[in-house]
Amino acid sequence: MAADGLRTGEVAGRAGVNVETLRYYERRGLLTAPARSLGGHRSYPPETVTLLAVIKAAQRLGFTLDEVAELLDTGRRRHPTPDLRARARAKLAEIDHKINDLRAIRGQLEEVVAARCDSLTNCTCPACPMPFADLAALADDGDRADPPDH
C-alpha cells in the first residue's frame, strides 16, 4: 500500500461519513475506485477527504447526488463551463419555490391552530379552514356527475 494512501476507515473518519457512505459513493461513480493493496485493502489518495467534503457541501446546498455526479463529471473534464452557475441559479429558483410553498403551508397551519381544529375528517370548530369532509363529499359527487369519456 502506498505510504500516502488512506484506508477506508481513515477516509470515512476524516470526512465525517460512515464507511458504507464511502462505498456507496464509489459505486455511484462519485469517487474513483481506489488502488488496492496486495491484501485487497482499499488505498485512497488523501484528496478523497476533500472531495467528500465537496460532495457533502453540495448536498447541503440542495443538490441531489445525481446532480453532484454530473457537476463532478463536468469538473473532471477540466473544461470551464457555465454549468455550475446555471445549475446554482436553477437550484435557487427551486428553493424559492419551496420557500413559497412552505410559507403557504405555514399560513394554513396557523389558520388550523387559530380555529382550534380538532379532527382531520370530523372537525367540530365553527369555521374550519380545512373542511376535509366537505371537500371529500364534493369530490365524490363530482366523480358521479362527470359523463364518461367517448
Image (cartoon, helix red, strand yellow):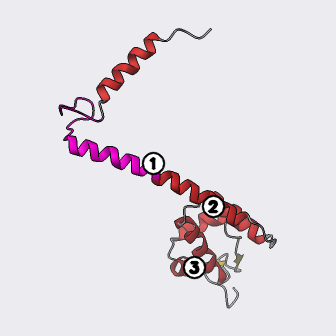
* Residue at screen point 19% across, 38% down: 118
Give the camera-side residue of 42 and 15: 15
- SS at mark 3 in the image: helix
User: Which quadrant of the rendered structure holds the N terminus?
Assistant: bottom right
Give the residue pinned by disc 1.
101
Neighbour tally class for label 3: few under 14, some 14-19, many 20 plus, Cα within 10 Å: many
Q: Is residue 29 visible?
A: no
Chain-order first, disc 3 or disc 2: 3
Marks counted in the figure total 3
User: Which quadrant of the rendered structure holds the C terminus?
Assistant: top right
Give the camera-side residue of 8 and 108: 108
Q: Position of residue 92 (x, y in %)?
A: 57, 60
21 w.r.t. 118: above or below: below
- SS at mark 2 in the image: helix
Nearer to us of marks 3 and 2 is: 2
Residue 114 magenta-drawn?
A: yes
* Residue at screen point 60% across, 70% down: 55
Give the camera-side residue of 64 and 36: 64
* Residue at screen point 45% across, 48% down: 101
Q: State how far apart marks 3 and 1 are (Cα).
A: 39 Å
Task: Indicate the amino acid at tag 1.
Answer: Asp
Magenta part of the protein: which range? 100-129
92 w.r.t. 13: above or below: above
Q: Position of residue 2 (x, y in %)?
A: 70, 87
Q: Quick check: marks 3 and 2 in contact, CB under 8 Å?
A: no
Task: Indicate the amino acid at tag 3.
Answer: Val
Chain-order first, disc 3 or disc 1: 3
Residue 67 magenta-drawn?
A: no
* Residue at screen point 40% across, 21% down: 139
Give the residue pinned by disc 2.
89
Give the residue pinned by disc 3.
11
